[in-house]
Image (cartoon, helix red, strand yellow):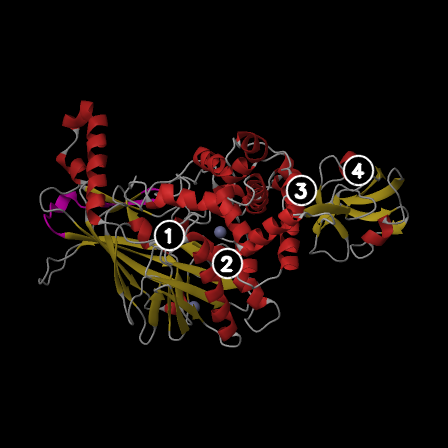
Amino acid sequence: MLSNARLKYPKAKVIHLQVMNRLKFLISRSLSLSLVLFTISVAALAQQQPLRIKYWLAMSHPSSHLFEVTIEVGLPADANPSSLDFQMPRWSPGRYAVFDFAKNVQEVKARMACPAGLDCALPNLAITRLDDQTWRAQVGSFTPSGMSVMFSYKVFANDLSGTFSQLDSRHANFNGGCVFMYVVNHKQDPVSLSINAPKNWRVINGQTEGKDKTEWQFPNWDIMIDNPTEIAPDWTENDFKVEDKTYRVVGDEGGKRPDLVRDIEKIVRTETAMWGPPEFDSYTFLIHFANDGHSSDGMEHLTSTQVIMPGSLGEAGMLEETLDGIAHEFFHVWNVKRLRPIELGPWDFTRPANTRGLWIAEGITNYYGHLMQRRAGLSDDAKLLSTLAGQITEVENAPGSRLMSAEESSLSAPFIDDAVHAQHTNLENTSISYYPKGEVLGIVLDLLIRGRTNGKASLDDVMRRMYQEFYLKSPNATYYLRGRGFKNEDFERVTSEVAGMDMSDFFNRYVRGVESPPFETAFAQVGLRLVRDPRAPVAIGVSADENDQANFKIASVRPDSPAADAGVEVGDIITMFGGIKLTPANFLKTIARYKPGDRIQVTLQRGGHPVQTTITLASTKVFDYRLEEMNDATPGAKALRSAWLNGK
Ligand SMILES: [Zn+2]
Ligand SMILES: [Zn+2]
């Protein structure tokens, strides 16, 4: 994903490998259960046999926002389970907050299907809701060898997003994780999908090889939900080819469309030049210009990305913002969709994801998303350096950056990746996003490696070596996807190998620790200097609520700040400041009249009552960072900078 919006995608597996994995699974399971094996019924073992699973998706009343899902499960002929459990994920890959998609499920039913060719009326099966996300269909009483269970439900969907889904009179846009339940213990089985679209609506996704395709086969459920799909009466498609791969740009708006398609092709060429050929035949960019001022997202998938922009393509800056999202999401084709932290696929959807690797998966992707726009010629040196300095500004000013490491930030993803909190939190002061934190670490690592190897190696080599070792060359570790996931220790080892020196001190201090990385040394390698300017002459350490323009209402209080020392709390309104009525508009001008050490009489409104306090002003701890050229940069440093910026 992107930080307010993120983007992701996967691809088909080889059947015999699946069978191998299934066998390994059965063997290990049998061993672990050997003591109690004889008490386990034949039905329980039958649950581990692959089932024939087909998903039917219909949308007969688009304005109701209700998708109609039927899961047809063919029971094995030799032994039948007494029941089948169906489970809605609590979250879906790429966005790690827990959303509990089961909340939008309604009208759950199950019945036996009539045997093929027969017309019959079979009664509904009993359904038991086992917990918040699981439904059990009782099938045992029928002992229906070789028959199918038809499990059906409706799911409400009215969000245009990279994680949620939308069905309305204009279109259907779905992300499978919030629509499709899986059959418990059978997430690894091959599945098929059939879409029944409204008349004259057309279907497109990252697995649409020909026109009017409505049926798909997937090697497992995890891959099926990695295929966001747009179904609408009208959309535009522009195709281009890069090295024999077909790329489709699918969207809903004209205007600057030729520019958009041309620049996406530049991004594809530049990122492919770094990584080598991507492992697919075709890839689809699904782009919506929502033009509603708020819908904004991006999500990576194995052979597609879904990008949703809040504005229209014609408005100022929107083309550039869209390309910024695309550069990030397309980089995920390699980093996270295929080269992945070990915890990211296959997933356990009964509990939140826990991985230490999101600073690599998202943060380093964020870094390359910016760098690749420069290498593709979509931005110049000044713009890239300003963007990178902006990321440093964000990280270095965040109090949470000195409390939360990059690894802890990754583990905190369920709380900080667009999670909604009913309970008040202190995360603003205690957390840092793995996007900018990982990006800053990526910048520093890249430049240090370039400097230490005198330009012979870079972070590009680290990423390529990781992709080779863990994705392309590793035997499949699970049913889910080619290769195996990596641990942070693997990334550290490969980084040390590429750098030609032990990098454990770097990882201890800046990845697992919370120290500021060695900016000065890193930027000096390429003849640049990081400088910082205080954002204000003095500070009290608060921010104002942007939604209240009339009052200076406190939205946040920095720990260890003059305001915190004076007992100011979030929600207080500063009415009088040194005898002046304070507003958000006159705040900076008002405090600029003072200097650090001055003591100011302040009146607060707290819970409707006036409170008097004294704030002792201090120097600001907030700085704006920028990168400037060193006057004495050596030709060697300039050559390293050019190689970095141009990808040579
Ligand atoms: Zn991302
Ligand atoms: Zn649409």
Q: Residue 201 appears in which quarter of the rendering?
A: bottom left
The spot of residue 600 in percent (x, y) is 88, 41
Of discs 2 and 4, which sits in the foreground? 2
For mark 3, what is the residue? 396
Q: Secondary structure at mark 4?
A: helix
Residue 72, placed above or below residue 496: below
Residue at screen point 52% across, 59% down: 325
Q: Give the distance between the C-alpha atoms of the residues marked 3 and 2, in whole angstroms.
A: 25 Å
Mark 1 or 3, which is nearer the eye? 3
For disc 1, the neighbor class at 10 Å (few under 14, some 14 to 19, many from 20) is many
At 20% from the left and 27% from the top, the residue drawn is: 31
Residue 72 percent location from the top left of the image: 21, 55
Tell me the crowding category of disc 3: few under 14, some 14 to 19, or many 20 or more residues within 10 angstroms, Cα based.
many
- Find disc 4 in the rendering and name its residue: 562
Dot 2 crowding, Cα within 10 Å, few <14, some 14–19, many 20+:
many
Magenta region includes residue 387: no
Q: Where 78 falls versus 589 (above or below)?
A: above
- Give me the C-alpha separation between circle 3 and circle 4: 19 Å
Helix, strand or loop for disc 1: helix
Percent across and percent down for residue 367 are: 55, 50
Real-space Cα distance between discs 2 and 4? 42 Å
Residue 133 magenta-highlighted: yes
Q: Which residue is under mark 1? A: 177
Residue at image point 42% right, 42% down: 466
For disc 2, the marked residue is 327
What secondary structure is found at the residue carrying circle 3?
Answer: helix
